Image: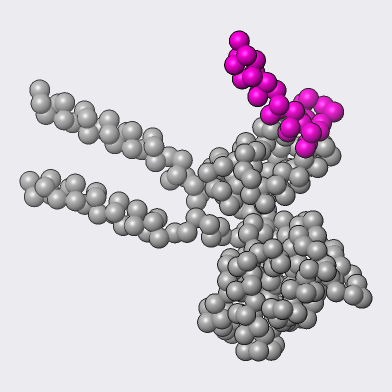
Amino acid sequence: MRLKTFLPFLIFLPMIIFLWKGLRFDPHLIPSPLIGKPVPHFQGKTILTPEKNIDQTIFLGHLSLLSIFATWCTTCIAEQSALMHVHHQFPNVFMIGLSFKDQKNKVADWLKKYGNPYRVIMNDPNGKIGIDFGVYGTPESFLIDQQGVVRYKIVGIIDPKNLSAMIQKITH
Amino acid sequence: MNKIILFFLLFISSSVFSADLYPFHSLQKERKFNALLSQLRCLVCQNESLSSSNAKIANDLRNQIYHMVQQGKSDQQIKQYLVVRYGNFILFKPPFIISTYLLWCMPFLMLLLGGFIMVKIIRKNR
């Protein structure tokens, strides 16, 4: 008799918990299938002269932060100051930029204006390398370990505090 | 009469527009291309398919899929290419794997549960 009165509540409560958790998810933060896998193979060139050839071996031997950016992306301007901060705070992190669907001359000027934390900047004018990394909206960043395995993907502006925690997890 | 002609013309002009952007010599490839696009989700405008979305990423992926269809790749190969890079979320129809068993089976389970409760109530009222 007592169980029957509480039965609707017992069904309702887990449903509410499920739905509440569901509301907290951001559907635009799509989990990347690249996590835990080696960096995808690609071939490209650096954007600043003199042009050099680059492929996925650029990620080996050091902890890397790959940052996908574009001069046409307004959020990237805000992220650039966070990246300059990261550059100073973590000098051991090899920062690599991917210029996504952009024009060379615009990129050089943009970097002079907003800061250039990158050791290497790859040119991806048609977005092919971006697609290989599963990029759907700039700015996006990947934290890649010394063996070239993708460990984290960050969609949106990097929070240096969160990044610090991620780096700690990788290096220990 | 003029209104009917105008209405008809609107439909013709929209199909010519898309044929110019992604021209195919084979009708079969064109149908395959259009069918594929409608099965794939735009990751930015997430309720839209790649065929209707105006987002930058949708445009880039349409171009990529167009080239792959021209190269003769199969539906399976093209979907696999996208899933490897973007995950299962890009497919409107999720695969039937462990993590989606509940998603797929829930409607049937709910129907069974509802049916069970209904039978109980009917029996009780007799």
Q: Vertically, is B40 above or below A10?
A: above
Residue in the picture at 47% in, 59% down: A26
Q: State whether residue A132 appears in this view.
A: no
Magenta stretch, residue numbers: B1-30
| Colour option used | one colour
Q: Residue furthest right?
A: A50
Image quadrant assignment for residue A93: bottom right
Residue in the picture at 60% in, 41% down: B49
Q: Work out whether residue B19 or residue B69 is closer to the camera in this orientation and state it.
A: B19
Image quadrant assignment for residue A68: bottom right
Residue B110 shown in magenta: no
Q: State whether residue B55 appears in this view.
A: yes
Q: Position of residue B36 (x, y in %)?
A: 67, 36
Residue in the picture at 77% in, 62% down: A102
Q: Is residue A101 left or right of residue B4?
A: right
Q: Position of residue B114 (x, y in %)?
A: 27, 34
Q: Position of residue B35 (x, y in %)?
A: 67, 32
Q: How many marks?
A: 0
Q: Residue furthest left?
A: A1
Residue B6 shown in magenta: yes
| Helix, strand or loop for the magenta stretch, by majority | helix
Residue in the picture at 62% in, 89% down: A89
Quadrant the C terminus of chain A occupies: bottom right
Q: Vertically, is B9 above or below A172?
A: above
Q: Vertically, is B119 above or below B71?
A: above
Q: Residue furthest front?
A: B2
Q: Vertically, is A21 above or below A104?
A: above
Q: Work out whether residue B83 or residue B70 is closer to the camera in this orientation and state it.
A: B70
Q: Position of residue B96 (x, y in %)?
A: 54, 42
Q: Is residue A65 left or right of residue A22?
A: right
Q: Is residue A155 left or right of residue B16?
A: left
